[in-house]
Image (cartoon, rainbow, N blue to C red):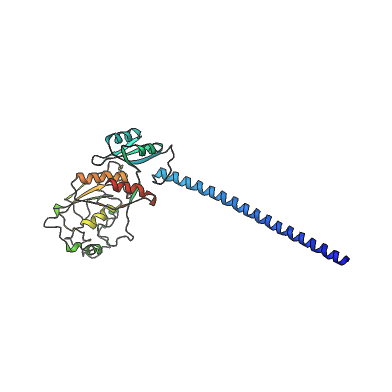
Amino acid sequence: MKIIILLLLLLITLFFVGTLAVEERKSRTLAVEERISQTLAVEERKSRTLVGEERKRRTLRGGSDSIPDSSSKVNVVVEFKTEQGKNDAIQMANKVLYESKLFSVVAIEIHSKYIKELKKNPNIQSVGFDEQVHAIRPADPPTNKSSPQESSNKKNKGKDRRDLVEQVPWGIQAVRADKVSPGPDASSIKVCIIDSGYDLNHPDLPKSTVTGTDSRRYSKNEGYRWNEDVDGHGTHMAGIIAALGTNNQGVRGVIADESIRLHIAKGLDNKGDGSISNIIEMVEACISAGSDIISMSFTPSSASSGSSFNSFSDIL
């Protein structure tokens, strides 16, 4: 009988010990889960803080998806429906950057706290940040050092030059430009190139039929003259379009006739950078110069620039 009682007591003891062990494990699990939850909450707050800071930085750079700090100043492009809308925008501005004569557009510097008010104005069509744009660069640098596609600040003085045989870029055949004639007189065509400038002294580019518009926005250090091209991108683009086809050097352009008329609009600075309002201003200069074609080769600074870049396309 005593043995049975002892066995029962042992079983009861083991049961309670097992139960306590299970409860302790549950308690430990809950404590670990609680710590994990707290850690995730802290990380989420940090992440939100970083996102907020990034949006503020984008605001100062003109990022279109940013949440403006009400105390910051930003540059915006305002498309207005009526003259009253234009006047309203100018009255809110700290500074007028550009006022178009051909388009219903004004570029202004403004406190970001006024942006919502501008967007609600029935006399205004759209408000977009004056995004930065950059020259589109080729994937590989050009190998023909005697061509206009070399940066004008790295002019070839005749050394290490390929044989003086004119090169026909693959793009000429790709678009079948070699199968089409511009007509008996290429001077009937005027192409406007909005870019970083033009090396007027380049041996493989037209000279006497070229005009241009200086930038009123850039300082002398940034390269405001149309017939200077420190960056070289504009000269590269001009070579693609109009490199001479009769001088047995360099490359052949799509219209390789020296009588073609070019108008160079300085929309990008010495680094190949500009802004949407710069480009709109230069589009206006191209139209005023009587251009038949406008060439532009640039891209917005980031993916976040999409909405403002689309607004720019709609304006034009």
On the rendered structure, is 202 left or right of 36?
left
- The outermost residue toward the left is 184
Residue 92 lies, in percent from the top left, at 35, 34
Q: Nearer the viewer, residue 257 or 90?
A: 90
Q: Nearer the viewer, residue 198 or 131?
A: 131
Name the quadrant of the N terminus: bottom right
Residue 13's image quarter? bottom right
Residue 264 lies, in percent from the top left, at 23, 49
Q: Nearer the viewer, residue 106 or 162?
A: 106
- The outermost residue toward the right is 2
Q: Is residue 275 visible?
A: no
Residue 114's image quarter? top left
On the rendered structure, is 118 left or right of 32?
left
Q: Residue drawn 27% across and 35% down?
A: 83
Q: Is residue 6 visible?
A: yes
Q: Is residue 175 above or below residue 297?
A: below
Q: How many marks?
A: 0
- The outermost residue toward the front is 1
Q: Is residue 103 above or below residue 158?
A: above
Residue 235 lies, in percent from the top left, at 26, 53
Residue 250 lies, in percent from the top left, at 23, 61
On the rendered structure, is 113 left or right of 291?
right
